[in-house]
Amino acid sequence: MSSLFGFLERVDEYLVRMEKVIIIFLLSLLIVTSFGQLLIRNIFKLGFVWVDEFTRCIVLWMAFVGGALCSEYARHMRIDVLLHLMPGKGKRAVEIIGNIFIVVVCSFFLVAAIGHIQYQKASSLQLMLQGVPDWMVSLVIPYFFIVTILRALLRIKKDILDEEQLELPEIGSSNLNGESEQALQTK
C-alpha cells in the first residue's frame, strides 16, 4: 500500500511541475495573443475572430489548471478561520473530514464532467474554437477533478499518518520550494 502512495506522490510531484509550466505558457500566450489582437485592431483596423475564441479557451484552461495547482497547496474550497483556532488533533480531524467531503463532491462533478464531454463528442457543434472539437477543449475539466481527488486522498493519508504537509510559501519569503521553516533551519 505504501508503494502505491509513493507512486501517487511521485505522479503528483510531476503533475505540479507540469501545471506550473502550463500556467506560465498559457499566461504568456494569452498576453501575446491579446496584445497582438489589440495592436492589429487599433493600428490596422482589422482583427481575427479566432483570437477571441482562442483567448476564451486559454482562460478556461488557466482557470482549471490553476485550480488544480491550488489543490496542491490546499488553497481551494477551504475555510481556514476555524482551523486556526483548533488544537492539533481536532484540526487534523476537521481537515480529514473536509478532504473526504472534497473527494465526494469532486467525484460527483467528475462524473458530470465526463457525461458533458460524452455529450459534446456526440454533438457536432463547435462553439468554443472553430476547427477544434469542444470536447477536446473541455478535457481540462475532468483533469481538474481527478487531480483534486488525488491530492485530497494524499492529504487524508498524510493527516492520518501525521506526516508533514506541503505548505504554500509565505509572501515575501525566500522559501519557494514549499519546505517548512523547521526543515530550512535544520539544513
Image: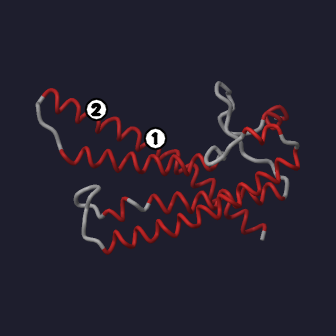
Quarter of the picture containing the N terminus is: bottom right
Kindly identify the amino acid type of the residue bearing the numbered disc 2: Phe
Which residue sits at x=51%, y=46%?
66
Across and down, in percent, residue 151 comes to 65, 57
Name the residue beneath numbered marker 2.
35
* Vertical side of 135 occupied by 98: above or below: above
Which residue sits at x=82%, y=37%?
85
For residue 103, side relative to residue 3 (left or right):
left
Across and down, in percent, residue 3 comes to 75, 68
Which residue sits at x=11%, y=31%?
45
**Mark seen at residue 184:** none
Which residue reaches farthest top? Answer: 172
* Vertical side of 49 occupied by 107: above or below: below
Quarter of the picture containing the C terminus is: top right
For the residue labelled by badge 1, is the local secondary structure a helix, a strand or a loop? Answer: helix
Kindly identify the amino acid type of the residue bearing the numbered disc 1: Ile
Residue 115's image quarter? Answer: bottom left
How many C-alpha atoms fall within 10 Å of the one at disc 2: few (<14), some, or many (≥20)? Answer: few
**Mark seen at residue 24:** 1
Residue 119's image quarter? Answer: bottom left
> Front-most of 97 and 21?
97
Q: Earlier in the sequence, mark 2 or mark 1?
A: 1
Across and down, in percent, residue 91 comes to 82, 47
Q: How many numbered callouts?
A: 2
